[in-house]
Image: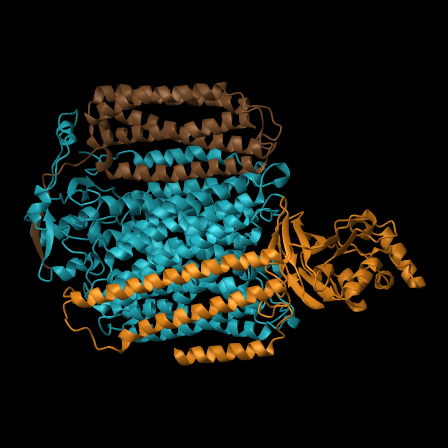
Chain colours: A orange, B cyan, C brown
């Protein structure tokens, strides 16, 4: 049993080192909340391991003893049973002390976490949809309110307040390297404060089962230095780039005359649908279809041509397009930086 | 306590005098067992208590052992189906972006896996074990309300078939075993899939509730004379507490599924936030049942551990009273923890902290149980046979599950691991480690009693090691991959997250674990056909089920034992004290007082009847039909009423008349 | 295993009333689980009522009169119910037959009035969650009432046959009395929830 355990541990360690861990791992924290939690996880796990080993020793001891002396099972050694009672009571007492300690620890950790976002200046409303994230940056000036999808840019080193809700089913927002998860529930509004210590890209995904494409509902937190973040916000507020080539212009016309406009919005054009992601700056995003594909010309074409093949069950319908038409639309979207 | 005390201490209630004055047909007496020689006694009892011959006879059986065997076999088949689900899921997850199955099938698979394992395997099998053993252990001839017991089996089978036929038709629920709204609600759960979930839940719970009531009454009222509360075997205590938990927890899930089906079928708005309902209400109701559910599965397993350890440690359980009080404490506390399944829903912080404390608290009675079992083993090296090996495996794995449970009780920590593979690992350690391993030990332990033959010890050891290695290889790495960020209920994952290798390892472990059940099935069949004859008491254990032959006769005991010790067979090595005076031409058994188990009434137990089956068909048909129209309840009322009247209407047997 | 006779139980009676009988305990078990169901349904109602500050969700007030009449009928029925129990304990067939007929009628009467309760709620089940909860609570108790009245009628018929002269039947009458108390008892909180809690909002 012991050898098996060491093999299992060794294998696990090897696998751990091999994996490209960190991008979406609770054990590789990149923000104050996740750091506090990682510490808590290790502390609990360590203490539990110690307790487990002690119980296993207590279990192994009788296996090494000689068989019980009196053959008659009802003949008992009262003295021995009294000693055992003291040991059992002590063990129960220790259990209680450990549990009280862990409860207090958990309570104080919760207070630390609650304090992280108390001075958040930036508020972002995240709305869950089957199967993508609508991201709206709130601002006192209505013209500065910004709507995008799936990728959340934040200033590094600053706490940010996320307001979480949903318009369809329950989802859960979880970026493990920054913070624990919180649900997006229709009819409820939850508040999650996050903070990234350093610039970087942190992956997360929906953690509450939400239907067919629960597996492909990724999100990215992109933490940038403040200046870069402000510049990004200003860029995103601009209307969509005008098509640069004839093909792209044809693509824009196609987009506006096909069912695409029913669901998608492209700022600066008549396309104003709100049931699907805002595409005004779609090409500036790193992935497509909520983290399902990386952004590239080929993937854009694949996604538009065969959404049910890429993401079966997704609400993106197949739009009947010829090869040239598909190329034109891809050329147009590719220019929406 | 001597037998004289049993009769002299009994104070006769005053009503007894009154009853004899009423308008009663004088009792027709029949032959009694007093002074009857063994051969005639067996002949009489065998004729009185037999299950009638033929197919109709078999379908009419009310013998608790016959019903329990059917339950056990059915539950084992559902285990195999649920296990196959798991294997298919593990093949799909063995590498990133595998295309073996798509999300539509995967979501049905994991839902069916959960539903099957919880409602069609775990709860029925622990209850079935109780149906078999409790009447034997308390020394009576049949379970209380035997027809209700037969009915509950038929309802259970039809519920299971209903779910699996739906799966074969690709109509199985795909919303998770918890079926949260709005995903399962009228707007986002089109088709009949969520309705299948709701109705299947409702009727398997009808069956659990009926068994629970029958078990409670058997334990409270049918104990052998002298088996006062302090002499009830721990296994029976565990089943008693479990049955009480069932009675107070299962209605919650029936209310949940009924509300859901009303929202879906007749347009109520109970869970619809747009019209004054609330989605979280569903979760509160579901987990008010869902957390006790874990203990409904786990507590009977602790009873099995408490039965197996003394037999092999060769002494009564250490801390009998402590173990009983722990069972009761766990039963109560299990109702105060449900919110820890909902920490990620953003509940007020103070409330959440309360549930952290209560979740931590339940670790104390569970700890008491563990320490008492260890102390029972400390007298010297126990006899190591397969049942005990599985109990040792239970300690190895369940303690891990219990400790990770402590981690989950912490609100902040839970927010990182909730709904990830860490939780999947945790509850499989609790449910498989804490319940399936003891069940497997129990299978080896009681198989000789049920079949009269031993299972192979050598295959048993192979089975144990294969199960241990397969189980730990499959589930331990899940803790790690969960902390690496892998959520539950995903049908695939991207390669760049680096979860591929560890998932391949997990899948290999899962296949190994599945193979261990194939070996187990082989050992069961081999043992039943070729096993060495077992004798009445192959382990020299101390409780009453070992006092009768293996397999036990239809009437369980030729004469009802009189109990003087918690391990009666150890206390009475020469000859078992028994009671005499029961009729042998009618199904008489002893009804005793609740606390002291003084014999109080000679009551007659129900005879075989086909009506419970017909009633189950009427109820099942109504539920099935109700998925399509609410009027089914109105149309179904007539056949249900007719079958119930047929069930309860007296037939003029000696069992009906006094 | 060898046996030695140690206890003679041949003079025990063959039936008992109340807690002496397993059926009584079974009835109690079913009351416990049904009571839990009622409590949870009531809890769900109160949960939603506290969640929405304007509970009743701008629906009109229910008309309490049919419900109040049902309540009075049910409370009045407790008197003959307990008189019947006394006769059942004495195994007196004549008075028990009369009592069962009376109890059947006192079961049917509130069911008839109950028919008028549903329209008196002044809202449909599919209007909003408030309406849904009222219909669910009233529906739950009506199911309860119908099944128990059905049970009472069957037992009444049985008491008029030759099977009525058995001690076990008198025990069944006692359990029927016990269960009717429960049906009445569960109605009181539901009555308050349906007709009086909405008036607070």
> As drawn, is A211 to the left or to the right of C188?
right
> As drawn, is A44 to the left or to the right of A157?
left
Give how far across and how far down residue A202 sits, in percent: 67, 66
Give how far across and how far down residue A156 sits, in percent: 71, 64
Give how far across and how far down residue C93 sits, in percent: 21, 22
- Tell me, yes or no, if residue B453 can be seen here: no
Please, which residue is most extreme toward the right here? A246
Query: Is B529 rendered above or below residue B17?
Result: below
The residue lying at 44 percent from left, 18 percent from top is C69
Q: Which quadrant holds the C terminus of chain B?
A: top left
> As drawn, is A252 to the left or to the right of C101?
right
Query: Is A161 rendered above or below residue B376?
Result: above
Query: Is B607 rendered above or below residue B378?
Result: above
- Tell me, yes or no, if residue B131 can be seen here: yes
Give how far across and how far down residue B601 sits, in percent: 17, 39
Query: Is A229 rendered above or below residue B515?
Result: above
Among the 4 quarters of the image, the one containing residue A150: bottom right
Among the 4 quarters of the image, the one containing residue B276: top right
The residue lying at 47 percent from left, 63 percent from top is B426
Among the 4 quarters of the image, the one containing residue B126: bottom left
The residue lying at 61 percent from left, 73 percent from top is A21
The one of B387 and B298 positioned closer to us in this rendering:
B298
Q: How many labels does the image show?
A: 0
């Amino acid at each position: 049993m012991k050898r098996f355990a060491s093999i299992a541990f060794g294998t696990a360690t090897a696998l751990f080192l091999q994996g490209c861990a960190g991008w979406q791992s609770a054990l590789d924290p990149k923000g104050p909340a996740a750091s506090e939690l990682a510490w808590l996880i290790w502390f609990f796990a360590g203490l539990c391991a110690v307790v487990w080993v002690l119980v296993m020793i207590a279990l192994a001891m009788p296996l090494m003893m000689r068989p019980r002396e009196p053959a008659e099972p009802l003949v008992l050694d009262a003295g021995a049973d009294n000693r055992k009672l003291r040991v059992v009571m002590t063990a129960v007492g220790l259990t209680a002390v450990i549990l009280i300690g862990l409860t207090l620890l958990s309570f104080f950790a919760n207070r630390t976490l609650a304090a992280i976002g108390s001075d958040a200046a930036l508020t972002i409303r995240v709305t869950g949809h089957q199967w993508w994230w609508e991201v709206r940056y709130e601002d006192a000036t209505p013209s500065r309110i910004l709507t995008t999808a799936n990728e959340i840019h934040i200033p590094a080193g600053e706490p940010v307040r996320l307001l979480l809700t949903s318009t369809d089913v329950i989802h859960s927002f979880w970026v493990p390297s920054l913070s624990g998860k919180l649900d997006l529930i229709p009819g409820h509004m939850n508040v999650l404060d996050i903070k990234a210590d350093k610039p970087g890209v942190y992956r997360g995904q929906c953690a509450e089962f939400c239907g067919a494409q629960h597996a492909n509902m990724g999100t990215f937190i992109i933490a940038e230095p403040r200046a870069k973040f402000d510049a990004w916000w200003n860029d995103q507020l601009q209307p969509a780039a005008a098509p640069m080539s004839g093909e792209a212009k044809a693509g824009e016309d196609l987009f506006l005359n096909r069912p695409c406009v029913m669901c998608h919005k492209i700022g600066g054009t008549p396309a104003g649908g709100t049931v699907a992601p805002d595409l005004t700056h779609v090409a500036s995003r790193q992935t497509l279809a909520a983290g399902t594909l990386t952004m590239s010309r080929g993937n854009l074409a694949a996604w538009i041509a065969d959404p049910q093949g890429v993401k079966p069950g997704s609400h993106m319908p197949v739009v009947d397009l010829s090869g040239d038409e598909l190329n034109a639309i891809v050329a147009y979207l590719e220019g929406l930086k | 306590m001597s037998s004289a005390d049993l009769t002299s201490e009994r104070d006769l209630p005053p009503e007894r005098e009154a009853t004899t004055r009423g308008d009663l047909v004088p009792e027709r007496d029949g032959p009694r067992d007093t002074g009857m020689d063994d051969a005639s006694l067996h002949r009489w009892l065998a004729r009185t208590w037999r299950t009638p011959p033929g197919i109709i006879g078999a379908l009419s059986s009310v013998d608790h052992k016959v019903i329990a065997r059917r339950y056990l076999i059915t539950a084992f088949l559902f285990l195999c189906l649920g296990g196959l689900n798991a294997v298919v899921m593990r093949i799909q997850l063995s590498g990133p972006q595998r295309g073996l199955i798509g999300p539509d099938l995967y979501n049905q698979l994991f839902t069916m896996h959960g539903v099957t394992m919880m409602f069609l395997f775990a709860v029925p099998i622990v209850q079935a074990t109780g149906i078999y053993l409790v009447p034997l252990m308390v020394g009576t001839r049949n379970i209380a309300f035997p027809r209700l017991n037969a009915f509950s089996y038929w309802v259970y089978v039809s519920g299971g078939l209903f779910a699996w036929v739906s799966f074969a038709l690709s109509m199985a629920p795909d919303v998770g075993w918890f079926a949260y709204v709005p995903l399962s609600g009228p707007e986002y759960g089109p088709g009949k899939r969520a309705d299948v979930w709701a109705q299947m839940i409702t009727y398997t719970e009808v069956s659990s509730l009926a068994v629970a009531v029958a078990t409670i009454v058997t334990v409270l009222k049918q104990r052998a004379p002298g088996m006062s509360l302090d002499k009830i075997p721990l296994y029976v205590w565990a089943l008693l507490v479990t049955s009480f938990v069932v009675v107070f927890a299962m209605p919650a899930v029936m209310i949940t599924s009924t509300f859901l089906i009303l929202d879906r079928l007749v347009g109520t708005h109970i869970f619809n936030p747009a019209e004054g309902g609330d989605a979280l209400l569903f979760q509160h109701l579901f987990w008010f049942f869902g957390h006790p559910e874990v203990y409904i599965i786990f507590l009977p397993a602790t009873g099995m551990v408490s039965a197996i350890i003394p037999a092999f440690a060769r002494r009564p359980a250490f801390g009998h009273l402590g173990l009983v009080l722990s069972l009761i404490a766990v039963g109560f506390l299990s109702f105060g923890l449900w919110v820890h399944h909902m920490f990620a829903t953003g509940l007020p912080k103070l409330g959440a902290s309360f549930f952290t404390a209560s979740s931590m608290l339940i670790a104390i009675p569970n700890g008491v149980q563990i320490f008492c079992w260890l102390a029972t083993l400390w007298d010297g090296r126990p006899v190591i046979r397969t049942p005990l090996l599985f109990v040792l495996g239970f300690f190895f794995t369940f303690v891990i599950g219990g400790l990770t449970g402590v981690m989950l009780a912490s609100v902040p920590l839970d927010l990182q691991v909730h709904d990830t593979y860490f939780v999947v690992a945790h509850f499989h350690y609790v449910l498989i480690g804490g319940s399936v391993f003891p069940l497997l030990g129990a299978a080896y332990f009681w198989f000789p009693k049920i079949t009269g033959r031993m299972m192979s010890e050598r295959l048993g050891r192979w089975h144990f090691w294969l199960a241990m290695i397969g189980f730990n290889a499959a589930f331990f790495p899940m803790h790690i991959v969960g902390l690496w960020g892998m959520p539950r209920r995903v049908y695939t994952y991207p390669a760049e997250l680096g979860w591929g290798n560890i998932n391949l390892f997990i899948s290999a472990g899962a296949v190994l674990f599945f193979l261990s059940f194939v070996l187990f099935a082989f050992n069961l069949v081999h043992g039943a056909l070729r096993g060495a004859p077992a004798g009445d008491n192959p382990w020299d254990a101390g409780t009453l089920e070992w006092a009768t032959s293996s397999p036990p006769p239809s009437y369980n005991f030729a004469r009802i034992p009189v109990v003087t010790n918690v391990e009666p067979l150890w206390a009475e090595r020469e000859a078992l004290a028994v009671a005499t005076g029961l009729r042998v031409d009618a199904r008489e058994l002893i009804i005793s007082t609740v606390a002291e188990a003084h014999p109080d009434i000679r009551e007659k137990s129900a005879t075989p009847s086909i009506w419970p089956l017909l009633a189950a068909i009427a109820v099942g048909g109504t539920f099935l039909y109700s998925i399509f129209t609410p009027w089914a309840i109105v149309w179904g009322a007539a056949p249900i009423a007719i079958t119930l009247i047929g069930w309860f209407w007296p037939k003029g047997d000696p069992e009906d008349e006094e | 295993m060898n046996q030695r006779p140690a206890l003679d139980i041949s003079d025990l009676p063959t039936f008992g009333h109340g807690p002496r009988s397993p059926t009584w305990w079974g009835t109690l078990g079913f009351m416990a689980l049904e009571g839990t169901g009622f409590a949870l349904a009531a809890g769900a109602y109160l949960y939603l009522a506290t969640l929405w500050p304007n509970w009743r969700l701008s629906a009109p007030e229910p008309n309490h009169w049919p419900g109040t009449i049902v309540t009075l009928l049910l409370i009045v029925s407790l008197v003959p119910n307990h008189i019947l129990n006394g006769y059942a304990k004495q195994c007196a067939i004549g008075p028990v037959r009369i009592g069962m007929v009376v109890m059947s009628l006192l079961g049917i009467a509130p069911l008839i009035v109950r028919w008028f309760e549903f329209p008196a709620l002044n809202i449909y089940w599919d209007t909003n969650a408030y309406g849904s909860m009222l219909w669910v609570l009233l529906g739950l108790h009506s199911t309860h009432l119908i099944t128990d009245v059905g049970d009472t009628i069957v037992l009444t018929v049985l008491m008029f046959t030759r099977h009525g002269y058995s001690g076990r039947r008198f025990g069944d009458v006692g359990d029927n009395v016990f269960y009717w108390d429960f049906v009445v008892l569960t109605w009181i909180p539901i009555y308050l929830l349906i007709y009086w809690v909405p008036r607070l909002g």
